[in-house]
Image: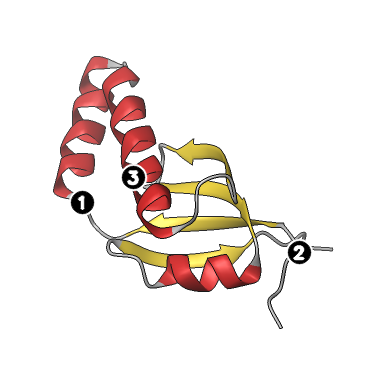
Amino acid sequence: MENTKIESYYCFMNYDPQYALLRSNQRKKGRSDELDLYLSRKHDEVLESTLEPGTYRKTESLVIVDGFAVEITEDQASKLRSAKGVRVVEKNEEIA
């Protein structure tokens, strides 16, 4: 039976030399516009190529690490784990 409960997950990407270069440039220049745009597009492409349109909601791209938050089902998280360039996908859980 397919799990349809939507939950928040974090997805972290494998090493990306372009991200490393842009992050280094951001630190030197003090601006993150180019890095923000690069990561947002990159993360959107991973989601679009892996999951059905309209079945997920990306809530943020993370600049400090190459990753993003997304609201998906457990089954979608499993699919995302096998996507090219994805290092790890973990459910966001509160620590008591």
How packed mark 3 is, by other alpha carbons closer than 10 Å (few <14, some 14-19, many 20 or more), is few
- Marks 3 and 2 close (CB-CB < 8 Å): no
The quarter of the picture where the N terminus appears is: bottom right
Query: How far is the residue under mark 3 from the one under mark 2?
Result: 23 Å
The quarter of the picture where the C terminus appears is: bottom right
In the rendered structure, find residue 77 and report the number of the disc placed on it. none
Q: What residue type is labelled 3?
A: Glu
In this figure, which residue is indicated by the disc labeled 1? 16
Q: Which element carries disc 3, helix, strand or loop?
A: helix
Residue 80: % across, % down? 45, 65
Q: Earlier in the sequence, mark 3 or mark 2?
A: 2
Residue 75 as seen in the image, left or right of residue 36: right
Residue drawn at 33 percent across, 35 percent down? 41
Q: Earlier in the sequence, mark 3 or mark 1?
A: 1
Colouring style: secondary structure
Q: Which amino acid does label 1 sit on?
A: Asp
Q: Which element carries disc 2, helix, strand or loop?
A: loop
Residue 89: % across, % down? 50, 65
Residue drawn at 24 percent across, 57 percent down? 15
Q: Which amino acid does label 2 sit on?
A: Lys
In the rendered structure, find residue 45 and report the number of the disc placed on it. 3
In this figure, which residue is indicated by the disc labeled 2? 5
